[in-house]
Amino acid sequence: MQRRWAAPLALMAVTGSGLLLAPPAQAGQAAQAGDAGCSRVTVGAGWYGDNQARLQQLVDQYGRCNPHRPGGARTKPVAVFDWDNTVVKNDVGDATMFWLLRNGRFRQPARGDWTTTSRFLTPAAATALAQACGPLARPGTPLPTGTPEGAGCADELNSVYGTAATRTGAAAFAGWDRRTNEPSYAWLPQLMQGWTAREIRGFAAAARTENLAAPIGSAQQVGSGTATGWVRYYDQQKDLIKGLRKAGFDVWISSASPQPVVEVWAKGVGIDADHVIGIRNTTARDGRLTAHLQGCGSVEDGADTMITYIDGKRCWINKEIFGVRGAAAEKVQPAARRQVFAAGDSDTDISFLRDATALRLVVNRNKNELMCRAYDNSDGRWIVNPMFIEPKQQKATPYPCSTTGYVGHDGTKGPVLRGDASVIPDQTDSVFQKGS
């Protein structure tokens, strides 16, 4: 990975809206200058290039062992991790979706009307779902998607969820804001309507057990087809999260998987439910989840348009971690009210990664806008790491940063711009595991 600075970065102290950079030697000195009884936290091995050293510098500067850490001893520095394919390999939302289909836990919607499951569902998708699933169960009762007679319904549900299209190729969703929502992601918690959060946690726990026990690379039968059948925690990320928490960081998870699902998985890295921000349903008086979603910023509950996705992640982080309310939560906050560290793997994570004031870790999955910004590294705060399990090979062609790397609110593609509105040139993929 090409750097845009002459010497390695180390100490990063927030001063207003900017950063002060100091040489690496001072990072170790800061850690040693703390209380003699303070045990220095060290970042484990297994990282690409100088990423381990960069992460260690972050811990040394912002951790509890540095008495001069930015914000003072009483202020915990915030670190935010995306979940799927950042902390774990594969997707826990997918894993739960497949378990629910195999075990017949989705319900026929009210009146058999599938448009009640998402305001963005197209007539073509609603018709396809009604044809495949309508005859199988009464409204409000579970669909037998784990049986041979329910395979067609399972296939249609899985197609709409996984490809945002029907089995015949018709678009399944229309009319959403591409920077605050992804209706196929939102559809999973919406399909969970009728169950309580506790019941969903039980389903997610069962799926977790199966997927952790399954061999790496294994598949499972879903409907008439097969799907990914395994998930693994990244040991390096588990170790990093543990180290950050030990060093006094306030560590959070922000995910575009359903809230109860991520809560179950996050326990495996020591993160409690009150530090998880996933897609959140509204709840009926009897405690059962509805098909509508909680809002953020200027978006009211039930509008279903602001999930933890790109700019929506920024809003939810500002709201839940920093206590920003109303429309202000949708805006970039002053440096003192932002996370110092963020980690992600996808374009869904761009906004909250850019908001991080000290260091941003990107797990390389060849996502255009994210990799354009990470490789451009215009402010020197980005580091890139190959996936820790089954890393991707080098992308054969440059990322189209100067032309189509950015996707606008209406879906229009354009160039990726820096903060000063200059265009990021196309970037070569340079951080990958050779021979993978």
Image (tube, rainbow, N blue to C red):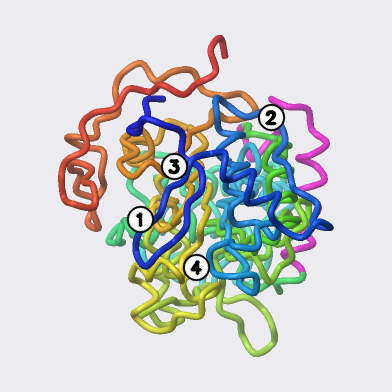
Assess whether residue 193 is covered by the magenta stretch: no
Query: Residue 212 magenta-drawn?
Result: yes
Q: Are marks 1 and 2 in contact (CB under 8 Å)?
A: no
Please name whichever residue, 300 or 266, is drawn nearer the observer in this view of the structure.
Answer: 266
Which range of residues does the magenta coloring cover?
A: 199-225
Q: Is residue 283 above or below residue 417?
A: below
Q: Which residue is mark 1?
A: 173
Read off the residue under disc 4: 317
**x then y, percent, for residue 3:** 37, 29
Examine the image and state in which quarter residue 180 appears: bottom left
**Amino acid at circle 2:** Ala
| Residue shown at 83% from the left, 36% from the top | 213
Count of numbered tags: 4
Circle 1/circle 3 CB separation < 8 Å = no
The structure residue drawn at horizontal position 18% and vertical position 52%, both measured from the top left corner, is 420
**Secondary element at image label 3:** helix
Q: Is residue 295 left or right of residue 281?
A: left
Q: CA distance from mark 1 to mark 3?
A: 10 Å
Give the spatial CA distance, label 3 vs label 2: 18 Å
Identify the amino acid type marked 4: Ile
Q: Which residue is mark 2?
A: 219
User: Element at badge 4?
Assistant: helix
What's the residue type where badge 3 is placed?
A: Thr
| Residue at image point 59% right, 42% down | 55
